[in-house]
Image (cartoon, rainbow, N blue to C red):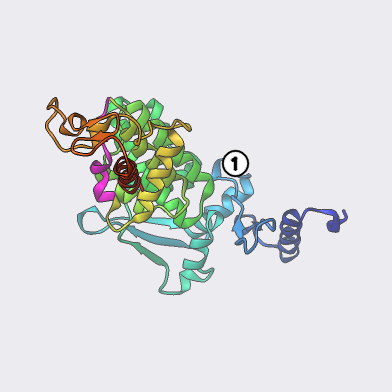
Amino acid sequence: MNLSRLPLPLLYIRLTLDRSHRMHIPAYDLRIHYRDFAYQNSRRLRMANPNISEATAKTFAELLSGPIVDIHVGSDENKRSWSLHRNLLCHHSDYFAEVFPEDAKKKSGHQLDLPEDDPGGFELLVKWLYQGRIDDVSDMPVERKWDYATACQKLYVLCERFNISQLKNVAMDQYRKGIHQAGLVPDPEEIKPIYDKAAPGSPFRKLVIRIAARQIMDPDQDKDAQSYRSCFEGNPDFAVDLVNAIREGAGGKLFADPTEDGDCEYHEHENGASCESKETQVNGIVRGRGPKGKDKGKQRASDANILSDATE
């Protein structure tokens, strides 16, 4: 095969495979990376390996052999611990390959503490590692759907850090399906930590921003921008993303020109009260000034300037 005729990204993958073959790397430790040369300074990414349910008998045996490592997740009374196969962890994530080198069993660094993470999300990760799947929220009773969706959001955060894209997409689908079937959406207090923990440009950020925008735009909801004030604090990106999402959701529909009609909407007086401004102006003539001469023109120009300043 003429490698010089391959597209650049494929050429990069092919060379990695050939080098791995010559080095006789075990199937469980085969790491295929790619880079999209269409973009300047694109970073090196790892392609997803098949999960354990798709592995051959030989690979299955290799994945469940070798050193065992300990991972502690959460803190205080919520802390939980797992003893897991290093080969299986490294099969799916370079993160674990760096944390647990091949001689991890001989060193003191054969454990990992994740005090800031959620044990419920990590439990789903362990299930997927050893079974190749997680439960489908559609099969759960309604009262469990919200909690399971929340756990899937925690799982997504872990997958982003560990760069396990295959499971990350599954977690996203289960979260969206779970909150839809539960008939619930996250409150601003729940959206803020989700947005803050998600990486910039993350699909999960896009999701929660669109949820917030839809809540604000929905006439049947009591949410407005004020409801999300806590999300704005210390995070201007949230405000920018929210405004852009509302603009996108409006579908190009333009609201009424604020410089036309609706005069009293921009006045200070009680609703239904007789408007002094309208009473003192008749056909553009202000009481106390004559309809003739330069005074008339000057007054109209002045009015126009005030209006312009108020809408800038």
Q: Position of residue 257 (x, y in %)?
A: 38, 34
For residue 221: magenta?
A: yes
Residue appearing at x 36%, y 48% in the figure? 312
Q: Amino acid at mark 1?
A: Glu
Residue placed at 49% from the left, 45% from the top?
Answer: 167
Q: Going by the image, does 176 lie left or right of 27?
A: left
Is residue 222 visible in the rendered image? The answer is: no
User: What residue is drawn where x is 72% and y is 58%?
Assistant: 17
Q: Front-most of 226 and 46?
A: 226
Nearer to the camera, 302 or 93: 302
Visible residue check, residue 257: yes
Q: Which residues are magenta?
A: 220-231
- Residue 55 rendering spot, x and y as whole percentages: 60, 44
- Residue 270 vertical position relative to residue 26 in the rendered view, above or below: above
**Residue farthest to the bottom, as pictured:** 107
Q: Identify which residue, 4 or 220, lies in the foreground.
A: 220
**From this viewpoint, which residue is outermost toward the front?**
293
Instruction: Give residue 242's quadrant in the image.
Output: top left
Mark 1 sits on what residue? 54
